[in-house]
Image (cartoon, rainbow, N blue to C red):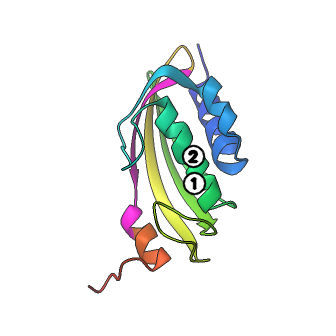
């Protein structure tokens, strides 16, 4: 049996916090499906790899702090907070130099120790407000 929390910690530590995008080759299955689709990125392993490459260019100091993890059968559930400074283009938004703090929740299904599906909720509205792209009072 695989330690799903250990695989999850590896993902957050290596991919998010250290910027080791290559680690996704070991963590994600070839038939991986992303259910938290992001415009401009395919909902598969290649799209997730491209997304994290873009995130590290846009937020070079990006860091995720895991607040809770739980395992339910073949699924890992995680609540975390992501922080970073907007230093590069992010989805067409030029660098603002602003810091963001964004909560997220992930649900990842595994097969043979590799992620095969991901569902997530990221508070993109809060991120856009913190970047100054939208005004919460409008």
Please provide percent x and percent y for residue 64.
61, 54
Residue drawn where x is 52% and y is 21% of the image: 29
Mark 2, residue position: 52
60 to 97, vertically: above or below:
above
Residue 64, visible in the rendered structure = no
Disc 1 residue crowd, few under 14, some 14–19, many 20+, Cα 10 Å: many
Please provide percent x and percent y for residue 122.
41, 55
Which quadrant of the figure contains the N terminus? top right
Residue 127: image quadrant is: bottom left
Q: Main secondary structure of the magenta part?
A: strand
82 to 71, vertically: above or below:
below
Give the SS element for disc 1: helix
Please provide percent x and percent y for residue 113.
57, 19
Mark 1 touches mark 2? (CB < 8 Å): yes
Disc 2 residue crowd, few under 14, some 14–19, many 20+, Cα 10 Å: some
Residue 62, visible in the rendered structure = yes
Please provide percent x and percent y for residue 112.
54, 13
Residue drawn where x is 60% and y is 63% of the image: 83
Residue drawn where x is 46% and y is 60% of the image: 91
Q: Is residue 13 magenta?
A: no
**Mark 1 and mark 2: Cα distance apart in space:** 5 Å
Residue that sits furthest to the left in the current view: 138
Q: Is residue 123 magenta?
A: yes
Give the SS element for disc 2: helix
Highlighted range, magenta: 114-125
Mark 1, residue position: 55
């Amino acid at each position: 049996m695989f330690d799903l929390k250990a695989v999850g910690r590896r993902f957050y530590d290596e991919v998010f916090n250290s910027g080791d995008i290559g680690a996704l080759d070991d963590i994600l299955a070839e038939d991986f499906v992303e259910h938290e689709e992001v415009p401009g990125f395919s909902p598969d392993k290649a799209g997730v790899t491209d997304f994290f490459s873009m995130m590290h260019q846009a937020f070079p100091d990006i860091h995720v702090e895991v607040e809770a993890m739980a395992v339910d059968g073949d699924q890992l559930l995680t609540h975390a907070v992501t922080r970073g400074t907007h230093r590069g283009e992010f989805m067409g938004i030029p660098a603002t130099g602003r810091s963001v703090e964004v909560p997220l929740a992930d649900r990842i299904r595994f097969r043979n120790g590799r992620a095969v599906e991901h569902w997530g909720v990221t508070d993109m509205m809060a991120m856009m407000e913190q970047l100054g792209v939208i005004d919460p009072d409008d």
